[in-house]
Image: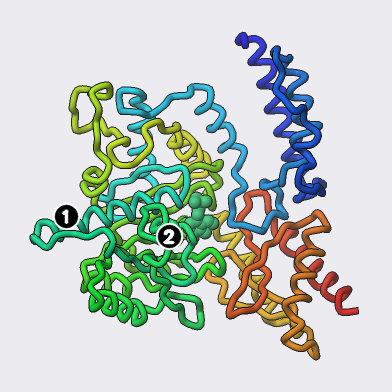
Amino acid sequence: MSPEEFRRAGREVIDWLADYQAGLDDHPVLPDVSPGALADKLPPAAPDYGESIEEILEDFGLQIEPHTVAWRHPGFMAYFAAGGSGPGALAETLAAGLNNVGLLWKASPALAELEQVTLRWLGQWLELPPEWFGILHETASEASLHAVIAARESARQVDETAGKGFSLDKVVMYASEHAHMSIEKTMLALGQGRDACRKIAADAEFRMRPEALEEAVERDLAAGLRPIAVGATIGTTSVTSVDPVDRIADVCERHGLWLHVDAAYAGPCAMLPELRGRFAGIERADSFLVNPHKWMWAPMGCSALYTAHPEEFRRAFSLTPDYLRTEEDPRAVNFMEYSIPLGRRFKALKLWLLMRYFGREGYRSILREQIGWAQELAGRVEAHTDFELMAPAPFSLVCLRYRPEGLPEADLDAVNERLLTAINAGGEFFLSPTRLHGRYVIRVAIGNLLTQQRHVERLWELLQEEAARLAR
Ligand code: PLP
């Protein structure tokens, strides 16, 4: 593609995206399609000869986009804020245009250094301990896997130094029953088995119970097992509950366990002094993660992992074959020594651009606004005789259900499922369900950059209208 052709097509792509964003309010969030609808439309084999970019872009608009979900839509409230942003898309375009691959510092000094600088900036905003080492991952799942590998390596080191030996098949870790499945999956991926991640019971407000954690650790120790780590969450996926990190850290300290804190969604709220209390104890973590690709509107593929023990990651992952040897310099960080991937994308570019574009105060004011709308909605739900707030709303997620007077408990799950289906079928909103205390619950996750107060108000109207229609 010549620079002229690239320029022409690039303008067309940006124009298309700008029009798309401008028209989102009148665009359905979910496509009205059945599985296979797109696959059946496309040719069974790729072309033998190249086609013009104009033709390809036209097909993108006609065939591909209509089958996409509008994640950037103001009514997209199903999953945590992951709608990205205009400036994020521009940063991603620049990164793809340069296509630097961060094998080593030498392979892209800007990639390696910008990652360190932006993670230091972000650490300052979130008031993380300044000595923590940060590394960007594609996803929180990948970051947690690396953290648990480092935790296991650290436990092995401790035991072997003490001359005790270390048996892989004895390894166990702990997380609340509300922790994200990615924590449990680390044990699966490491071949420890799913049961090696002990699910710790939560209290009535869905927070891990430190006493139950302590009991589980003691039971496992008595059975000759080797507890290595605890995964605590600030902002759990189903309900955004906050585990008592400080008290969990006490248990970890008593038993020499690695504390991994997952704040994938809620982490940016550490910027807000008024919510700082929800992060009490994070400075005691061994590893901590936050996803800028969620509530900081970076395009997908930007999860920041911090650790107080980079040396454990290095011990676990450092392996330098001859073909990758370069001169040693302490300022030339090679991230391949701290994680599994060798090839790394220029993820820091989007974080750098976004942090400059919004600034700390910009982020703070949008987060506060969105949290405020969620609190307002929670208040309305709570005050309504026919609706029920199903959990506290410490951030911007509201868990609710319709519970009209006179309808037996046994029917409520089905009624709420129908309510959710009706809302999602309407095209204006996309909500998702969960189960809390065994009951079907509707989640309203506010956090999309294009969402405005009027959208949240409209959703509340629609929920009442649809619910009333169902009751008739
Ligand atoms: N942790 C929490 C608390 C989450 O809510 C999620 C996703 O919503 C994840 C981890 C997984 O994030 P990722 O998709 O980046 O792996």
Horizontal relation, residue 2 to residue 164: left or right: right
Labels 2 and 1: the sequence-earlier one: 1
Name the residue located 62 percent from the left edge and 11 percent from the top edge.
1
Q: Is mark 2 within 8 Å of ligand 1?
A: yes
The 10 Å Cα crowd at callout 2, few under 14, some 14 to 19, many 20 or more, is many
Horizontal relation, residue 23 to residue 347: left or right: right
Q: Quadrant of the C terminus?
A: bottom right
Residue 51 vs residue 362, the one in the foreground: 51
Name the residue located 16 percent from the left edge and 54 percent from the top edge.
157
The 10 Å Cα crowd at callout 1, few under 14, some 14 to 19, many 20 or more, is some
Q: Amino acid at mark 2?
A: Ile
Name the residue located 79 percent from the left edge and 70 percent from the top edge.
418
Residue 91 horizontal/vertical position (percent)? 53, 32
Name the residue located 19 percent from the left edge and 23 percent from the top edge.
327
Determine the CA span between mark 2 and mark 1.
Answer: 22 Å
Circle 1: element type = helix
Residue 106 horizontal/vertical position (percent)? 30, 23
* Residue 79 versus residue 114 in the image, above or below: below
Does the image show residue 363?
no
Residue 227 vs residue 92, the one in the foreground: 227
Residue 328: quadrant of the picture: top left
Circle 2: element type = helix
Does the image show residue 441?
yes
Residue at label 1?
157
Circles 2, 1 touching at the beta carbon (< 8 Å): no
Residue 406 vs residue 6, the one in the foreground: 406
* Residue 136 versus residue 448 in the image, above or below: above
Horizontal relation, residue 36 to residue 95: left or right: right
Q: Amino acid at mark 1?
A: Gln
* Residue 21 versus residue 232 in the image, above or below: above
- Tell me, for residue 183, which label it has, or none: 2
